[in-house]
Amino acid sequence: MNDMTITRAEREAKLEGMGCKRKRVEDIRFTQGKGNYVDDVKLPGMLHGDFVRSPHPHARIKSIDKEKALKVPGVLAVLTAEDLKGVNLAWMPTLAGDVQMVLADGKVLFQNQEVAFVVATDRYAADDGINAVEVEYEALPVLVDPFHAMDPDAPVLREDLAGKTEGAHGPRRHHNHIFEWTVGDRDLTDAAFRKAEVTIKEMISYHRTHPSPLETCQCLCSFDKVKGELTIYGTFQAPHVIRTVVALIAKIPEHKIHVIAPDIGGGFGNKVGAYPGYICAAVASIVTGRPVKWVEDRIENLCATSFARDYHMTTEIAATKEGKVTGLRVHVLADHGAFDACADPSKWPAGFFNIVTGSYDFPTAHLAVDGVYTNKAPGGVAYRCSFRVTEAAYCIERAMDILAQKLGMDPAELRLKNFIRQEQFPYHSALGWEYDSGDYHTAMKKMMEVVDYAGLRREQAEKRAAFQRGETREIMGLGISFFTEIVGAGPSKNCDILGIAMFDSCEIRLHPTGAGIARMGTKSQGQGHETTWAQIIATEIGIPADDIMVEEGNTDTAPYGLGTYGSRSTPVAGAAIAMAARKVKAKAQMIAAYRLEVHEDDLEWDIDGFRVKGLPEKFLGMKDICWIAYNAPPPGMEPGLEAVSYYDPPNMTYPFGAYLCVMDIDVDTGVYKVRRFYALDDCGTRINPMIIEGQVHGGLTEAFAIAMGQEIRYDENGNVVTGSFMDFFLPTAVETPHWETDFTVTPSPHHPIGAKGVGESPNVGGVPAFSNAVNDAFSFLGSTHIQMPHDFWRNWQAAKTLGAV
Ligand code: PCD
C-alpha cells in the first residue's frame, strides 16, 4: 500500500506543507484579472447609492431640500437622518461603545460627513442627484487641536451626550472628554522617578494617517421582500461580526442575513468597522426593493471612513546612570475625532497600548490615556498593527534612543542592557501582559553582526567630523528598532467584540478521493490564506496542500469566526486549523488500526499515513483512509472524515524583531536616502517563508510611508488638506527602498504549531527604525526629538532650526 519507489524526502516535498515556499494559489486569479471583488458583483436591477457630504467641519443643519434631486432623471430616492429615524437607524453603535450618526442628525461634526444618501439607476445619476440636494448650514466654531479639546470654553461637539458624566469606559471630565484609561502602579512609578539618577521626558506624537487600501470600502445589499432575507456582499475583514451587528441593529433574524466577503483588495484595518454606507445601502434596498451598491471613492475613503493613530504621547523614563531603566510613565492624549469608532476589542479603549514597556524589563510603569472629541473623521483603526501597538512601539523605541542620547550611551548597548532575558519568559510585564516567549539578545546580536553595526558607527563618526569641517553637506543616521508585538486577540478572558469572545474556527471536510475543503472564520485581504492554511493541513494530516481548497468569507458556509486583523489569523485560526486537523487525524488513526488489524497505540505517524511500529511495510496512507472512511468504516463508526474546531487561545503571541535603517540626509534640501534597511523578524514557526517575506516587504513599505510623509492633515479651520493621493504619500516602486530580511525562530509555547503572527510586525518595528534614523542623523547637531512625518520639507526645517543651513 506504500509507494516504496519514492523517498521520504520526496513524499514530504509533495505535500508542500509548513516551511515550504509554496507559490500563492490565489495569485493565479489575481494576476490574470480573474479576482472577484465587490465591484465585480452585479445583480439584476441593481441601483447605486452615493453621499451628499458636508463641506463644513462643524455646522448646524438648518434644512435639507430633496425636491430638485428627486427630479433628476434616474434618481429614485434621497435618504436623510429623518428617514432613517423611521427605522431607528439614524445613529448606529460603534465598536468602542459610542454611537455614531449614520446621516447627519441636526448637525455635522467633521468635513465630508455623510449628510444624505442619493439612490439612482447609475453612479452618474446619483452624482447629479447629490449636486441637486440643497442643504443649508450654519457654521459653528471648529475644534481641531486635541490639546485644546478640554479647554473650559471649547465648543460643545457632541450635543447628544449633554450632561452625561459617564461614558462607555468610565467617567468623563469635560464635554469633549471620552474616557480616561489608566494601567499600572502610579505610586510605585512615582517613587521610581523620585529615586531616579537620570530621567527623560518628551512629547512624542504619532500623527494621524490612513490605511488607504487600493480597493476602497464598498458593499452591495439586496433585500428579498418575499423571503425576508438580506444578502450583503462587502469588503469585510470580519464578515460574521458584520452579520451579528446587522442582526442586532436592523432586527433581522441572523439566519436571514447572508454576508459574503468576496476577494478583497487590501484591508490594513480599514475594513474592520461598520460604516454609514453599509447601513444606507441596506435601508435603500429595503425601501426600493432592489439591490443597492455603494462604492467609496478615494477622497471619501481618505476623508471619512477611518483614520489611524493621532496619539500624542508624553513619555518619561527613569533610569540609573549606568543605564538600567527603573520606571516608565506615559500620558497619551488620543484624538478620536467626532465619534469614538475605534476598532478595538470592546473593553480596551486604547487597545493594547499597554505593551508600551516594549522589550525591556521595566520594574514598574504607569500609563494614562485620555480620549477626546475633535471635529475630525472618526475611526481609530489598527492600520497594520494590533490595536495601538505601533503607537506603543514607536513611543518606547523613540524614548529609549532619547535616553541613550542623554546618557551618552550607544542605543544598541542600552537596549542590550535592558532586554528581558531569555530565562525570564514567560515574562510578566509591569503593565499586565504575559509575554509567551522571546530571545531578544540573540536577535539583536545577529542584526548587529550582519550589518556590521560597529563599522557603521565608525563611518558615522567620520562623516560627522567631515560635516563639522565643512567637507560634506550630508548627515548619516542609524535607526535601531527592537520591537515586541502582541498579536492573536484573543483569549476570551481578556477580549471580546460586542460580547462575542474572540475565538476563531476551522472546519475540515475530506472527500472520498482524498481531497478536501477547509473553511475558516478568518478572511484574507491579500495575505495568502488560501495558500498557507492548506500548508498547515498538509503537514498535520499528510494530504498535499494542492488537494485542499480553502474557503473564507461566506457566513452561510464558514464556521463563526471573528475575522482577520491584528495579525490574529495565524495565532488563533491557525491554531484552530491544527486542532481540527488533529481531530481528523485521530479518527483516521482508528480507521487505520482497524484496517491494519493492530491496536491504535501500535501505529506511528509517518509523513502521509500511519505505519505499524516495527513493521515498515504495514502502512496505510491518508488518501486510502479517506476512501475507507466513506466506503467501509470500522463497525460502529460513523462514515465520513471531517471535524470542526473553535479555538480560544490561552494567551496572545509575542513576535519580535530587530530592525536597522541606515539613512543619509542632505541638510540643504532635506532629501533623504534609505541606504540600507535590515529587518530580522521572529514569528515563531514559519508556515510559508516566501509569504512571510512578502508580508515584511509590504509592512515595511507602509512603515516607510508613515514615517517619511504619509499623513492626514487638517488646517486650522478643519479642512482636510491631504484628501487625495496628490497630497497623501503612497510610495510607489520608485520611492520604495530595498529591503533585506532575516529571521530567528522562537516558537510560541502555547500555540499548537508554535506560530506567531507576522503581518503587522514590519509596520510596528519599521516606523521607529525610520524615525530613529532621522533623529539619530540630527542628534549631533543638538536635537533630541523631531516629530514625524519626516518629509523633505520637515527635514530641511529641522536642519534650519538646528543652525545647519
Ligand atoms: N504567516 C506564516 N507564518 C507565520 C505567520 C504568518 O506563513 N508564522 C503567514 C500567514 O499564513 C498569512 C500571513 O503570513 O498568510 C499573515 O499572517 P498573520 O500575521 O497571522 O496576519 P493575518 O491575520 O493573516 O492578516 C492580518 C494582517 C493585518 S492586521 C494587516 S493590517 C495587513 C497584513 O495582514 N493587511 C494586509 N498583511 C496584509 N497583506 C496584504 N496583502 N493585504 C492586507 O490587507 Mo490590521 O489590524 O487589519 O490593521
Image (spheres, rainbow, N blue to C red):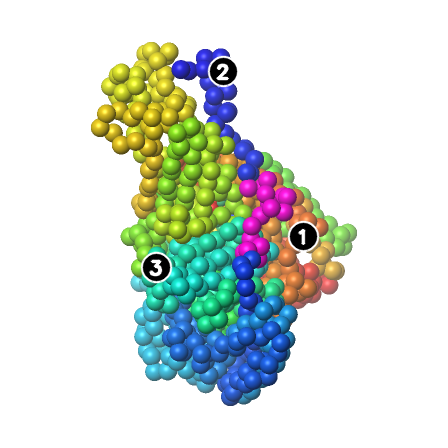
Q: Residues within 10 Å of mark 3 (few under 14, many from 20)?
A: some
Q: Which amino acid type is shown beneath numbered disc 3? A: Glu
Q: Residue at x 39, y 47 (%)?
A: 558
Q: Which amino acid type is shown beneath numbered disc 2? A: Ile
Q: Which residue is mark 1?
A: 732
Q: First in sequence, mark 3 or 2: give its number.
A: 2
Q: Position of residue 96 (x, y in %)?
A: 39, 65
Furthest-front residue in this view: 226
Q: Residue at x 34, y 59 (%)?
A: 254
Comparing marks 3 and 1, which lies closer to the viewer?
3
CA–CA distance in space, label 2 to label 1: 46 Å
Badge 2 vs badge 1, beta-carbon distance below 8 Å: no
In the rendered image, residue 33 lying in the magenta stretch gets the answer yes
Q: Magenta residues?
A: 26-41
Furthest-right residue in this view: 471
Badge 3 vs badge 1, beta-carbon distance below 8 Å: no
Badge 3 element: helix
Q: Residue at x 52, y 76 (%)?
A: 77
Badge 1 element: loop
Q: Which amino acid type is shown beneath numbered disc 1? A: Thr
Q: Quadrant of the N terminus?
A: top left
Q: First in sequence, mark 2 or 1: give its number.
A: 2
Q: Which residue is mark 2?
A: 6
In the rendered image, residue 83 lying in the magenta stretch gets the answer no
**In the drawing, what numbered circle is on residue 617?**
none
Q: Which residue is mark 3?
A: 254
The answer to whether 610 is drawn above or below residue 320 in the figure is above
Mark 2 CB near ligand 1 (8 Å cut): no
